[in-house]
Amino acid sequence: MIKKFIYLEWKAFTRSASFGANLAMKILIGFLMIYFSIIFIGMGVGAFYILKKMNMEPLITVNRFLIYYFLSDLVIRLLMQAIPVLNIKPLLVLPFKKSTIVYFSLGKTVLSFFNWVHAFFFFPFSVVLIIEGYDAVSVVLWFVAAFSLVYINNFLNIILSNIDKLFVVFIVLILALGAAQYYKIFDVTTFTTPFFEGFYATKWIFLIPVFVLIGLYVFTFRYFKNNLYLDAGLSKKEDIATTENLSWLNQFGTLGTFLKNDIKLIKRNKRSKMTILMSVVFLFYGFLFFSGGIETYDNPTMHIFAGIFVSGGFLFTFGQFVPSWDSSYYQLMMTQNIPYRGYITSKWWLIVIATVISTIAASFYIYFGLHYYIIIVVGAIYNIGINSHLVLLGGAYTKTPIDLSSASGAFGDKKAFNINVMLLTIPKLLLPIVLYWIGFKINGPNLGLAFVGLVGVTGFVLRNKVFSLIEKRYKIEKYSTISAYKQKN
């Protein structure tokens, strides 16, 4: 039966209307996986000897910071690891056991890259420990316990995935614990290090995370099996209806109508709400670059990268999925006398408004110097003039539907940020970096900022001509997009 599910998954992938784009993205993600795997292997092999050169006991030092390692891993999972989604409803009327469906779906998470990539750190590190004379049995038990914690995070992510904004709580927790330790207010590692050291020093303590993992798996399995039925578990949850006229937008005609629909969509759906939350998270991304805390990031080229990112949070999370946000009623919309220009313009204005708000909200970066805030403003100008057009143009080729009506029950995927979004964002960041680098080499940072800003202003001035090109492309792709949005898996 599991082989049958694998066969169905393969058919769904190869028969998808966006098969070409999906295949290209899979290949790109594959290279990214190889890159991170090599990094983890290097960390696993080199950590012991680097810590030795720093006159630090390797195993004790690693155990000391494992609490931050696993908390950070959980945050990344909550932010990026998608819950595997099967087209469950049609399967429930077929002679498939519910337990088999759940086993297969949970099994997919077990094989996730977010799990086995940690083996490239823990396994080489454990091998080095054994080679360097540490007790082999104790090292193996330590490895089993550490890897059990990796899978505990996996199942916690599944259980907690439908709790909005939870990853922010963990981010705040990590920052608070780190700051408290840095300023010697409270050192959480004083309490956690003995526990992690116990995995090596005491033979039976490794059983604690193992039993917790087994308990979490059983709980997760039963939870999804109990919710795997049509009349309630997978049905759409209905809330009390509320009315929002937003009548002040009527003065903008057709544009106002589209804007009202987008605002209501963002306010009423879990996944679209997450784009707002992600935009807020992006605002603080600049601290990595402007505070001088990370030497690699403290250079002019990386600063313009941060400027684009800080002001473009909404553009990169919401804009990347235009028109997929409207996929559930896209066919109906195309039967109406609706001009594409009005539709495209409304999305553009929504992105522009969000970018301006983000830029104003990021004014606290003036604390690090006026120059840094000017970088963010220039990045916003580029986002409005160039990147906003690029995401809308890319939308013509985005043929992956978004099901905003999915219940929050079994295997519902509500993540608004994923690896595909990140990879699609990279090309939009390269051109401003190149422009800035050229200007910087010619006559310093001011000319680099002038180049980036000038290109952004040029794109804004020529927006009507660009809209005509985008509109033409949307019309060409119209029927293939409608066909793609009909697919449910």
Image (cartoon, rainbow, N blue to C red):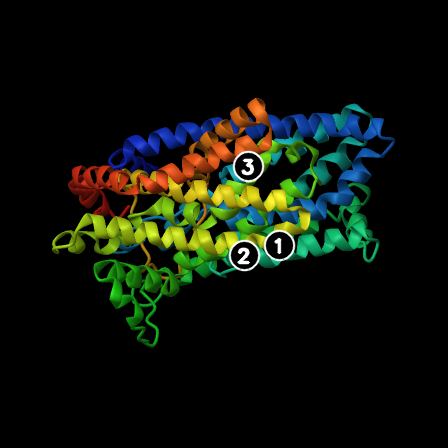
Q: Position of residue 302 (x, y in %)?
A: 59, 34
- How far separated are the C-alphas under marks 2 and 1? 7 Å
Query: Which residue is label 3 attached to?
Result: 304
Q: Quadrant of residue 455?
A: top left
Q: Residues within 10 Å of mark 3 (few under 14, many from 20)?
A: many
Q: Is residue 434 left or right of residue 396?
A: right
Q: Which amino acid does the dot numbered 1 rest on?
A: Phe
Query: Which residue is label 2 attached to?
Result: 361
Task: Determine the secondary structure under disc 1.
Answer: helix
- How far separated are the C-alphas under marks 2 and 3? 18 Å
Task: Determine the secondary structure under disc 2.
Answer: helix
Query: Which residue is label 1 attached to?
Result: 364
Q: Nearer the viewer, residue 9 or 448?
A: 448
Q: Quadrant of residue 396?
A: top left
Q: Position of residue 141 (x, y in %)?
A: 72, 39
Q: Quadrant of residue 468?
A: top left
Q: Is residue 444 left or right of residue 242?
A: right
When the figure is inspected, residue 355 is found, relative to residue 32, above or below; the finding is below
One can see residue 172 in this view: yes
One can see residue 158 in this view: no
Task: Determine the secondary structure under disc 3.
Answer: helix
Q: Position of residue 182 (x, y in %)?
A: 79, 50
Quarter of the picture holding the C terminus: top left
Q: Is residue 241 left or right of residue 484?
A: right
Query: Which callout, 2 or 3, points at the residue further toward the start of the chain?
Result: 3
Q: Give the residue at the far right of this rendering.
A: 55
When the figure is inspected, residue 235 is found, relative to residue 145, above or below; the finding is below
Q: Position of residue 117 (x, y in %)?
A: 57, 34
Q: Residues within 10 Å of mark 2 (few under 14, many from 20)?
A: some
- How far separated are the C-alphas under marks 3 and 1? 17 Å
Q: Which amino acid does the dot numbered 3 rest on?
A: Ile
